Amino acid sequence: MTFTRRQLLRTVGAACAADIVPRGAAASNGESTADDSVGVLVDTTACIGCRKCEWACNRANQLPVQPLETFEDVLVFADDRRPDAAHYTVVNRFPGATPAAPPVHVKVQCMHCNEPACASACLVSALVKQANGAVTYDPWRCMGCRYCMVVCPFGVPAYEYHNPTTPRVRKCSFCHERVVNEGRLPACVEICPPQCLIFGQRAELLRLAHRRIRREPDRYVDHVYGETEAGGTSWLYLASTQFAELGFPTLSPQSPSHLTESLQHGLFRNFIPPLSLFAVLTAVMALTHPDATRDGSRDGEQR
């Protein structure tokens, strides 16, 4: 598709008109999760480190898939692994609370924050918090700034550095299409043999987590990780030892999205006029991804 000067000016004009709308009229991507949003409760005391969740995730997301038997290799636990562009989730192993205690296995993936800093920092709404709690990514909107990678308090988003032409930000999508359109469980939850991953409404999962802590105080520390950290997350964890010893960052209850929003607003107000910035971004997006521009316009009308 060839973009004419008139079409380009029309696109820029649309961005200018949008800038006239009062700032308070648009809702932020970082809205708090509703009580009926979904989540997953991870009981690390029940995880056996089989890594079948890794295999299922790779298969569901069309990532490089090795035979299931290869995931039985325990040598990978020698290193502390992080999700990357080819692996949306990984399982790490940590020593137990005592020398006699069994090791603790911890699944790592995007936490799908209630108020996601990645979505707040994204200038083109490539990352969006969905109504059911999932934080999804649209590569057609992405301009590759990678601000999402900088602001994520969990250090999850990864980038396709090996792809020089159409690199994308990669992370767990919470199997959003699979859950919403097919009515299925996330792939990792569906395959988990010991059922240490429990999918359901976040509010109910929190009640279940606290009920387990009350019933078995010797088994769990009195802390549900993700209940308040960084404003709360859709993935919630139970453990037998302090979470800082299991690779979890110690975070305040305030979401980093408040900081990213204030920085953006200060930048726009004091340095770069929003009109100019969004006009340029819209023009670039229209020239490089015209289909995404049309889809974005339709999305705006629907919202």
Image: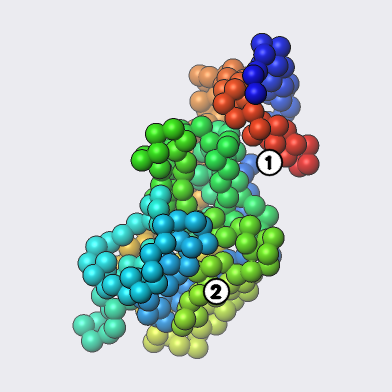
**Colour mode?**
rainbow
Q: Amino acid at mark 1?
A: Ala
**Which residue was labeled with disc 1?**
27
Across and down, in percent, residue 106 comes to: 37, 70
Across and down, in percent, residue 31 comes to: 63, 49
Residue 246 placement, left or right of 257: left
In the rendered image, which quarter is residue 162 located in?
Answer: top left
Residue lying at 64% horizontally and 52% vertically, measured from the top left = 130
* Local secondary structure at mark 2: helix
Q: Give the Cα separation between the discs numbered 2 and 1.
A: 34 Å
Can residue 213 be spotted in the picture? no
> Crowding at label 1, few (<14), some or many (≥20) Cα neighbours within 10 Å?
few
* Local secondary structure at mark 1: loop
Rendered image: mark on residue 41: none
User: Looking at the image, is mark 2 or mark 1 nearer the viewer?
Assistant: 2
In the rendered image, which quarter is residue 300 located in?
Answer: top right
Residue lying at 64% horizontally and 63% vertically, measured from the top left = 179
First in sequence: mark 2 or mark 1? 1
Q: State if disc 1 and disc 2 touch (CB < 8 Å).
A: no
In the rendered image, which quarter is residue 35 located in?
Answer: bottom right
Residue lying at 29% horizontally and 83% vertically, measured from the top left = 102
Across and down, in percent, residue 62 comes to: 49, 56
**Which residue was labeled with disc 2?**
190
Which sits in the foreground, 39 or 176? Answer: 176
Q: How many marks?
A: 2
Give the answer, above or below, for where 246 lies relative to 103: above
Q: Quadrant of the C terminus?
A: top right
Give the answer, above or below, for where 144 lies relative to 66: above
Which residue sits furthest right?
Answer: 302
Across and down, in percent, residue 161 comes to: 37, 39
Residue lying at 69% horizontally and 60% vertically, measured from the top left = 181
Q: Amino acid at mark 2?
A: Glu
